[in-house]
Image (tube, rainbow, N blue to C red):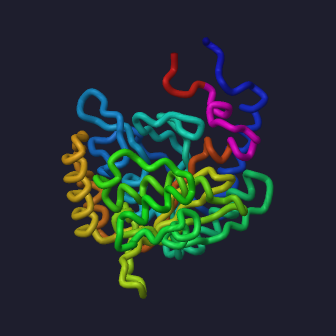
Amino acid sequence: MFAPTCNRDTWVKRQALMNKVRAFFEARGVLEVETPVLSNAGGTDPQLDYFEVEGGHYMMTSPEFHMKRLLASGFGDIFQITKSFRKDESGSHHNCEFSMVEWYRVGMPQEKLMDEVEALVSEIIGRPIHARRTRWIDAFREYAGVDPFCESMDNFVCACNERAIPVPEGPERMSREDWWDYLMVFAVELALAKNGPEFILDYPQSQAALAQTYVGEDGHTWARRFELFVDQVELCNGYTELTDAAEQRRRFDADLEIRRQMGKPLPRKDENFLAALESGMPACSGVALGLDRLFMLALGKNEIKDVILFPSPIA
């Protein structure tokens, strides 16, 4: 089949929405930038797989590292609309090549950035978005019916049985984090946003990625990170950004060790990004938002292939 999966009328509407995204940031004085989609270094996140091309280069899974180099160089508030690439991602809400908008606000608290995310989504979807804000641990308690830090791992099995969720094979071999990942997909995410849009925030330390952390009153270390779900679709991932170069290097090394144990390729660490942190990147909050998913919701489509001309893999 040579024809696109998105028809012309839908594409015209998508382009009008793309113009609205740009206008949103221009009205707020946020500078548009353009960074490479090819790099000599790749992200180390064990949960993401990247495309490596001839010459030892990587297709970027996100423009984050380059944009933070701009922040450290004094560019101030910036945004970028770009293509990103993640290997082996396909489905109704996934595509290996996808469009995102990523932006950074210098000196802006995470809570204000969440307000701005709501404003952008409201503008594009065409209806007011007032998202409930729920801590990660409370989402597990409410939607999965289990305390993620429970003493007995059998509690996770009980939570599955109580909600008619299939118990995975060999539950005794699953780590606590394995259970978190499993129940997030099969319990929490399925329940999310049934009562409207919802932010999940304050993730456990092991899921901090590039976010700052803090120690809560409960003694646990939490990441200053958030995700927004609208109509049960995950739209974005945002952080109070980590600016500590030594801590970032430690996290890269820990990620690479996990990747090694998983038998995954080991990308080179981005030394230019680490140098930018060492030079003194300003305090800021940042977020990446999937535009294909946002346009899918705005245009009343069930799958992102309906708003992409030629989804991957291309025949």
Residue sitting farthest toward the bottom: 217
Task: Please say if 56 is above or below 126.
Answer: above
User: Can see residue 79?
Assistant: no
Residue lying at 62% horizontally and 59% vertically, measured from the top left: 192
Q: Is residue 174 left or right of residue 87?
A: left
User: Can see residue 287?
Assistant: yes
Q: Position of residue 145 (x, y in %)?
A: 54, 67
Residue sitting farthest toward the top: 1
Q: Toward which corner of the image does residue 206 lie, by quadrant?
A: bottom left
Q: Is residue 288 left or right of residue 305?
A: left
Task: Please say if 256 is above or below 94.
Answer: below
Which of the pair 160/9 is nearer the observer?
160
Which of the pair 61/151 is nearer the observer?
151
Which of the pair 237/92 is nearer the observer?
92
Residue lying at 61% horizontally and 12% vertically, measured from the top left: 2
Task: Please say if 190 is above or below 112.
Answer: above
**Is-magenta flag for residue 243?**
no
Q: Is residue 195 left or right of residue 68?
A: right
Residue lying at 71% horizontally and 46% vertically, measured from the top left: 297
Q: Is residue 260 left or right of residue 97?
A: left
Q: Position of residue 291 (x, y in %)?
A: 61, 45
Which quadrant is the N terminus positioned in?
top right
Which of the pair 262/94 is nearer the observer?
262
Q: Position of residue 142 (x, y in %)?
A: 58, 69
Residue lying at 49% horizontally and 56% vertically, measured from the top left: 160
Q: Position of residue 237 (x, y in %)?
A: 51, 58
**Is-magenta flag for residue 300?**
yes
Task: Please say if 286 is above or below 35.
Answer: below
Bounds of the magenta span?
296-309
Q: Toward which corner of the image does residue 71 lie, by quadrant?
A: bottom left
